[in-house]
Image: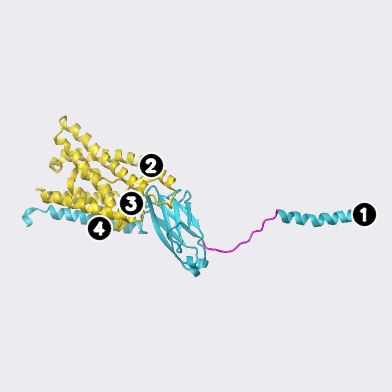
């Protein structure tokens, strides 16, 4: 779900960078207000490593292959730390493996990072809602993991569909993008289940990690 | 009578080759050099039926050729030998938002001699898997090292 160089026009790339700059600034300000920076940075750093490696592990879902993105998981566990973490992870992927591109880094960071912040706010509802705690945690972590991936996929698809270069066969490309959305919804379920597993594991082993 | 048969035979003999000529096809051949690209995802699965758009050096904005890759991600085209088309040919391959642009340099003399086989992968940069593994491991160590640095015990301060 990384847009490579040259697939979207330069003005959108610039807008992506501008928005990413704004969101990064806001996230850093939120982080600066955090009382547990010392404890949270190692968490963010380790999850950045996981995010970076996850893109190298491919799961074949025809017609393309997908890889775990884990942006929902990052948002759920890291909160606002997720956005800079995703930005750094994307930068490493773009530079080392040409996965995504430098000109589209801003746009890609928004596509993956914004839903992760949404996932964080969704998961935080756990403290407000009443109900059986364990069930609520499972439902919310699944919704965060799967929902943020779906949100990313939809943003990705909208951006691509509205920016298909006129040189391409627009209908064929549009169909291909819509088919790939089907693949992403399977991936969303996989990521949701993964998030539930990890969150319930952390809840048992180190519940203080999930306190925001 | 004999004379008549003779002319008839003669006529047939003359007519037949003309008839064959009318049905004949003429095949000429000349040697050109084609460029074959192969588009793969970075996990080595071919990009089958992906769209290919090729831009000639003389005009970079309008496509020179459009097509789709075959089952195994291959696409072959013959760059024309016009003098203003010597230079960098851009080849764009795209499928459902995945794809890449590669530049194939074509020089006048090389065009006649070499068959350029450029491997174009959707995301990879032509690193071997060993190189990729070392890069991944060293980056991970960077992240883990950062984590260790910030979680160091206070007694060491």
Report the residue that reaches farthest toward the front.
A11
SS class, disc 2: helix
The image shows residue A124, relative to residue A98, as above or below, that is above
Rendered image: mark on residue B36: none
Magenta span dominant secondary structure: loop
Chain ID, mark 2: A
SS class, disc 3: loop
Q: Are marks 3 and 2 on the same chain?
A: yes
Q: Which residue is mark 4?
A: B138
Q: Position of residue B45 (x, y in %)?
A: 41, 49
**Residue visible at 80% across and 57% down in the picture:** B14
Q: Are marks 2 and 1 on the same chain?
A: no
Of marks 3 and 2, which one's residue comes earlier in the chain?
A: 3
Chain given the colour yellow:
A
Span shown in magenta: B23-33
Q: CA distance from mark 2 to mark 1?
A: 81 Å
Chain ID, mark 4: B
Report the residue that reaches farthest toward the bottom.
B109
Of marks 1 and 4, which one's residue comes earlier in the chain?
A: 1
Q: Which residue is mark 1?
A: B2
Q: Which residue is mark 3?
A: A3
Q: Which residue is mark 2?
A: A178
Disc 1 to disc 3: CB gap under 8 Å:
no
């Amino acid at each position: 779900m990384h847009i490579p160089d040259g697939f979207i026009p330069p003005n959108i790339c610039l807008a992506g960078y501008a928005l990413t700059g704004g969101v990064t600034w806001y996230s850093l300000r939120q982080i600066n207000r955090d009382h547990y920076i010392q404890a949270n940075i190692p968490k963010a750093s380790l999850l950045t490593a996981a995010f970076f490696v996850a893109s190298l592990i491919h799961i074949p879902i025809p017609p393309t292959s997908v890889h775990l993105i884990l942006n929902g998981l990052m948002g759920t566990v890291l909160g606002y730390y997720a956005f800079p973490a995703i930005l750094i992870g994307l930068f490493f992927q773009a530079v080392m493996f040409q996965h995504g591109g430098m000109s589209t880094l801003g746009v890609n960071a928004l596509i993956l990072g914004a839903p992760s912040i949404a996932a964080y706010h969704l998961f935080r509802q756990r403290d407000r809602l009443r109900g059986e705690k364990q069930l609520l945690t499972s439902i919310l972590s699944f919704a965060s993991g799967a929902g943020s991936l779906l949100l990313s996929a939809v943003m990705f698809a909208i951006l691509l569909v509205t920016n298909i270069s006129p040189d391409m066969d627009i209908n064929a490309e549009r169909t291909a993008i819509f088919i790939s959305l089907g693949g992403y919804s399977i991936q969303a379920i996989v990521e949701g289940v993964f998030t539930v597993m990890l969150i319930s594991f952390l809840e048992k082993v180190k519940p203080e990690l999930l306190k925001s | 009578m004999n004379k008549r048969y003779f002319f008839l035979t003669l006529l047939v003999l003359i007519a037949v080759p003309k008839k064959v000529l009318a049905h004949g096809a003429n095949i000429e051949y000349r040697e050109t050099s084609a460029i074959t690209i192969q588009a793969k995802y970075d996990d080595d699965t071919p990009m089958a039926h992906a769209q290919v758009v090729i831009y000639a050096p003389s005009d970079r904005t309008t496509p020179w050729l459009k097509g789709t890759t075959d089952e195994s991600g291959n696409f072959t085209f013959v760059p024309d030998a016009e003098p203003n088309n010597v230079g960098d040919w851009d080849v764009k391959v795209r499928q459902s938002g995945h794809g890449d642009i590669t530049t194939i340099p074509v020089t006048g003399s090389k065009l006649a001699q070499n068959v350029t086989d450029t491997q174009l992968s959707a995301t990879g940069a032509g690193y071997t898997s060993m190189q990729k593994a070392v890069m991944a491991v060293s980056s991970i160590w960077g992240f883990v090292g950062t984590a260790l640095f910030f979680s160091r015990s206070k007694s060491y301060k």
